[in-house]
Image: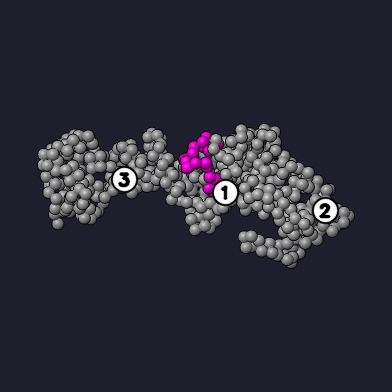
Amino acid sequence: MKIRTRFAPSPTGRMHVGNLRTALYSYLIAKHEGGDFILRIEDTDQEREVEGAVDIINRTLEKTGLIYDEGPDKDKGVGPYVQSERQKNGLYMEYAKKLIDRGEAYYCFCTKERLESLKTKTGEDGKEIMVYDKHCLSLSKEETEKNLAEGKPFVIRQNNPSEGTTSFNDEIYGEITVDNSELDDMILIKSDGFPTYNFANVVDDHLMGITHVVRGNEYLSSSPKYNRLYAAFGWEPPVYVHCPLITDENHKKLSKRSGHSSFEDLLEQGFITEAIVNFVALLGWSPEGDNEMFSLKELVEAFDYHRMNKSPSVFDFTKLKWMNGEYLKAMDEERFYDMAKPYLDKYLKDGLDKKKIAAMVKTRIEIFPDIEEMVDFFNELPEYDTEMYCHKKMKTTKESSLAVLKELLPVIEAHDDFSNEALYSMLQGFAAEHEYKNGYVLWPLHTAVSGKQMTPAGATEIMEIIGKEESLKRIAKGIELLSV
């Protein structure tokens, strides 16, 4: 049997990390076995739909390399792949009526006022849920037809048993059994004629031949209702793969307020796609061995959904930054420069050799915005404390640094070749001539031309970038500060 998985997002805004993980795992399960990955847009909740959200979905899948085999623009015979288009064809109403004919569903004409008067229970999220009392199930066929003829508003409800139990198997969580008293008669067709998410899912998954359904574990409690629908139709249910919850570092559900809950948030914060995909793959799945760095192709080869975890996965922002830094270090120089250039243009003044500066910072940053504090001193010398001239290892003090800079200034003034190599060679000669160790000369010079303790480059590399005039100006400033 060929594996067929689907990613079925609702177009309600940016793609949450949890949704991206669902898409990724669905893709990996299919591709690991040479199967098909399908995109279906679930837009039956028209009130929540956000303009441009479908474009975000398409753009995210394209950027991450999760190329679907079938979708809205790739119909392989089971389309349309957009639920609102399927709804226009009367598809969901047709299947709801089949359930009514089988006694597995019924019309409900209860008013809003009557529903509000019914008992409630507290759901898993702490919210009050109305418990429907099957009132309209007892309506005769004649009463139902009369109500329909009069145009009374209605919904169609699933007819679930209120006694006994329902069991289903999840590949990660094992067999789960619930009391049927917990299964409300959920709405299948809403009063506006649109199907509910739950009903459309089941119908579409069956008609599209979906073999494996991947989704978050918040849907575990709904799965018995899905399975009862499959049984009511006489259909084979799919293999269920429920993913663990993703939490923040405080073990709370990852929310939009965290600032890094969506794929686009992370891109805007300077992360690269490959690192995000690699990191998201590890939010609930453990590879064999110690390696955690995977390309998408390597993930396809390595991914075994049986190695997914039950326990919640912590979105470790520090680890993501580390991983991103490893990807940047390994990146091709030209590609790194192309990606870093917008940040270099933003943080550096014109006239500086940005390509050389990019090479300097490449192995020292974790995300692109880190560039700012790495390069700000190139623009202008920051204010700094002269205590920085004191370095135990280099055996420098303020007094020794002042003496070295005074000796160096005329030598550098007379030196015209400001390439890194020529400057370094000149300084080595100067140190040897005065019987100084290299660090004894280079540390004061580095401090004077950068005004910082840590920089992505040595003194001569910095001098090459800022040029002779600026270098001399900064050395003179150092002498001035040390002379006070």
Q: Quadrant of the N terminus?
A: top right
Lower position in the chain sequence, tag 1 or tag 2: 2
Task: Residue at 20% x, 34% y: name it.
Answer: 422
Q: Which residue is mark 1?
A: 309
Q: CA distance from mark 1 to mark 3?
A: 42 Å
Query: Which quarter of the picture shows residue 92?
Result: top right
Mark toward the viewer: 3 or 2: 3
Residue 445 visible at all: no
Up-down relation of residue 123 to residue 271 (above or below): below
In the image, which residues are magenta?
283-300
At numbered mark 1, what does the secondary structure look like: helix, strand or loop? loop
Residue 265 visible at all: yes
Q: Is residue 285 magenta?
A: yes
Amino acid type of disc 1? Asn
Q: Position of residue 287 (x, y in %)?
A: 52, 42
Q: Position of residue 193 (x, y in %)?
A: 74, 50
Q: Does residue 484 appear left or right of residue 57 in this picture?
A: left
Q: Which residue is mark 3?
A: 375
Amino acid type of disc 3? Val
Task: Residue at 61% x, 37% y: name it.
Answer: 30
Q: Position of residue 134 (x, y in %)?
A: 79, 59
Q: Which residue is mark 2?
A: 148
Q: Does residue 140 appear left or right of residue 454 in this picture?
A: right
Lower position in the chain sequence, tag 3 or tag 2: 2
Report the number of numbered marks: 3
